[in-house]
Amino acid sequence: MNERSSVTDLADSLRREVERYPEGRKLPSSRALMERHQVSPVTVSRAIAVLAAEGLVVSRPGAGVFRAAAFADGGAGFTGGGSAAAAPTARPGDLSWQEIALSADAGPRDQGAGPLFATLNVPSPDVVDLNGGYPHASLQPERLLAAALARAGRRPGAWERPPVDGLTELRAWFARDIGGNGGPLGAGDVLVTAGGQSALTIAMRSLVAPGAPVLVESPTYPGILAVARAAGARPVPVPVDEDGVRTDLLAAAFDATRARAFVCQPLFQNPTGAVLSPERRAEVLRIARTAGAFVVEDDFARRLVHTDAPALPRPLAADDPDGVVVHLRSLTKATSPNLRVGALTARGPALQRLRATQVVDSFFVPRPLQEAALELVADPGWARHLRTLGAELRDRRTTAVAALRRELPGLLGAYRPGGYHLWLRLPDGTDEAALTTAALRAGVLVTPGRPYHAAEPPAPHLRLSYAAVDSTARIAEGVHRLRRAYEGLAG
């Protein structure tokens, strides 16, 4: 059974059982609950934590878990023989006033967050998740993370307030990781952020004025579009092909819009998987420099390279002495959704603008997380984890590609050995929304192509992610279910 549903079921059972206990009565031991309900100690611990948060039980270290005393005002906890469900609830308020408050200034604002919720939602266990944006828990270095966090908590000053820009040692590590040893970046060029999405938000709000255009790849990661719209910017699409952004069209877009920023993913672009070619790398920098504009380089997939991939190109930031590139990178994708530690690099006044935006938004990234990140990347197991992750992603990609060629030949276009996604070109006229709905009914979650476009898409697509699945067998099963949905829609 799924761990989450196990916790819910056990909490429901214990909640009913506790109702029959007098106040102060001790609950059965964790071992007894494990044997009675056939669950793990983690499930018991989490279920007890749920009841404790509801005020139904109290945990006394060394003594056990006891039914809590009811509050005199009938708030948290039980009263008499009642239950949590029977407790009085407040009358729902009238929220209709918010329609005016949220739209009176400039009309409704659609931030385009729907695709982000879809990526972050956890599907039911019977659904094959070919949509998720984070590697499955089995691909995460949980032991390394736990050990790093434990060591970080014992570091001198670990709970003191960190510098606003981030710990100097961590900033120096990011500078070497991005620009190379002896490269153009130093610790003073780095700002530690709370993950990649936060870095994108800081960059967009700092470099693009509300109402101004910002150039984006087309298609592109929906989170980039959501950040732009939330900042009041106007995303302008520039088409991408198998070699990355079309630089001829990029130059034309700068001329037409006078934009001052271009946001791109040069390595394993999401969703196409394209890698910016060497010729276009130099052109992107030249075009932006001529336009007096910044290139925001989202290097999200640097740690998701497969073991059969050729040597990676350097980041654009490593070949930029003039401060054109604002580079962002995160440790999150290669570790855990909860290790939200990333970095922004910039040169000159741009860094001060980024710094001011971050301090207004969040002050700083919590020091224990920064200390844990330092412990993690210094651990000899870090390099081994990255090799294991690369091999696992390679195997999942190989399985997904083989299954698509067997089940849905003709839909798979070009792909590169890196990242975690594949971009499928559907026949003209295919209804993406109908297909994704049919796929969900068939038990597989996939992503329609429409949210990846800032304007009308030129053709229908689907994006498949093979990182969030627990096994290669489930990937093959998910593609098989997708074929059934596809054939049912066509028929």
Image: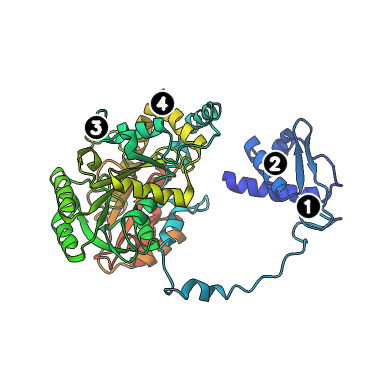
Mark sitting on residue 350: none
Query: Foreground: 169 or 24?
Result: 169
- C-alpha separation, residue under disc 3 versus residue under disc 2: 58 Å
Which numbered disc, 2 or 1, marks the residue that appears first in the sequence? 2
Local secondary structure at mark 2: helix
Which residue is tagged 4? 378
Q: Residue at x 69, y 48 (%)?
A: 53
Local secondary structure at mark 3: loop
Which numbered disc, 4 or 3, marks the residue that appears first in the sequence? 3
- C-alpha separation, residue under disc 2 versus residue under disc 1: 24 Å
Q: Is residue 215 visible?
A: yes
Q: Identity of the amino acid at label 1?
A: Gly
- Above or below, 420 against 256 in this view is above
Sort mark 2 into few (<14), some (14-19) or many (20+) by Cα contacts within 10 Å.
few
Which residue is tagged 2? 37
Q: Identity of the amino acid at label 2?
A: His
- C-alpha separation, residue under disc 3 versus residue under disc 1: 60 Å
Which residue is tagged 1? 77
Percent x, y for residue 139? Answer: 43, 37
